[in-house]
Amino acid sequence: AQKVTQAQTEISVVEKEDVTLDCVYETRDTTYYLFWYKQPPSGELVFLIRRNSFDEQNEISGRYSWNFQKSTSSFNFTITASQVVDSAVYFCALISYSGAGSYQLTFGKGTKLSVIP
Amino acid sequence: DVKVTQSSRYLVKRTGEKVFLECVQDMDHENMFWYRQDPGLGLRLIYFSYDVKMKEKGDIPEGYSVSREKKERFSLILESASTNQTSMYLCASRTGSSYNEQFFGPGTRLTVL
């Protein structure tokens, strides 16, 4: 069975601080994809990034960056110079093939980030 | 722009009522999903559909059913609502590969009294 662990339930930072959200996953498959979603107070989950298991290159998008390390089964998300608009619940997710034509998508329980002005 | 809409943002129903939650997507996506989100439990998949009139059970289908008569619309039905079905319900859609990202609606917060 696969698993996604977001050990940080809630994090508070002061505006302009950097913050890293941790995501550790477990899967037996060699082919899988990892995702990060943002859920602002409005409720709608917004897709941020997708990364496949064969691409360990880190990615940067503006103030957001992602560090994928297969050796530690982690896919961490860093926000640089945080802003109040970054306040949200962030979910890490994993999808892999579970056999017989089925794919299993597993979400972590989420990390609630509060950025204080 | 990609769009998934849900019929209600907030809904209050009484125990035993039949409840319909509607979801519509305008992206011509083949796959649609219903999740419920509860504090401390994250998102849990209730049902999904990979084509019109097709449905598959997710992790927690008990007490729910679904209907997909048209490609763009996926309905979640609570045949007899119970208080333990008070939750946030999220609809999502996805195209193509199972490895693609899902697009989510704004959610329906259902309270069953």
Image (cartoon, coloured by chain):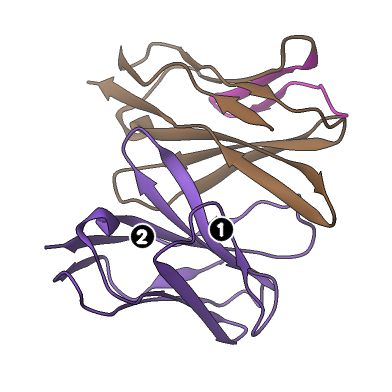
Chain colours: A brown, B purple
Q: Which mark is residue B103?
A: 1
Q: Chain of mark 2?
A: B
Q: Which residue corresponds to the image point at 62% horizontal and 29% vertical from the top-left? A: A3
Q: Left or right of B99: which side holds A40?
A: left
Characterize the local packing of mark 2: few (<14), some (14-19) or many (20 or more) Cα atoms within 10 angstroms: many
Position of the C terminus of chain A, as image quadrant, is top left
> Residue B103: which quarter of the image?
bottom right
Establish if A54 lies above or below A44. Answer: above
Q: Left or right of A84: which side holds B1?
A: right
The alpha-carbon separation of the residues under discs 2 and 1 comes to 12 Å
Q: Left or right of A16: which side holds A7?
A: right
In front of the other: A96 or A43? A96
List x then y, in percent, for residue A40. 35, 42
Establish if A84 lies above or below B92. Answer: above
Total marks in image: 2
In front of the other: B9 or B55? B55
Residue matched to label 2: B107
Position of the N terminus of chain A, as image quadrant, is top right
Report if residue A64 lies within the magenta region.
Answer: yes
- For the residue marked with disc 2, what is the amino acid? Gly
Establish if A103 lies above or below B77. Answer: above
- For the residue marked with disc 1, what is the amino acid? Phe
Q: Which residue corresponds to the image point at 58% horizontal and 29% vertical from the top-left? A: A62
- From where the camera sits, is residue A77 visible? yes
Q: Left or right of B65: which side holds B6?
A: left
Q: Which residues are magenta?
A: A54-70
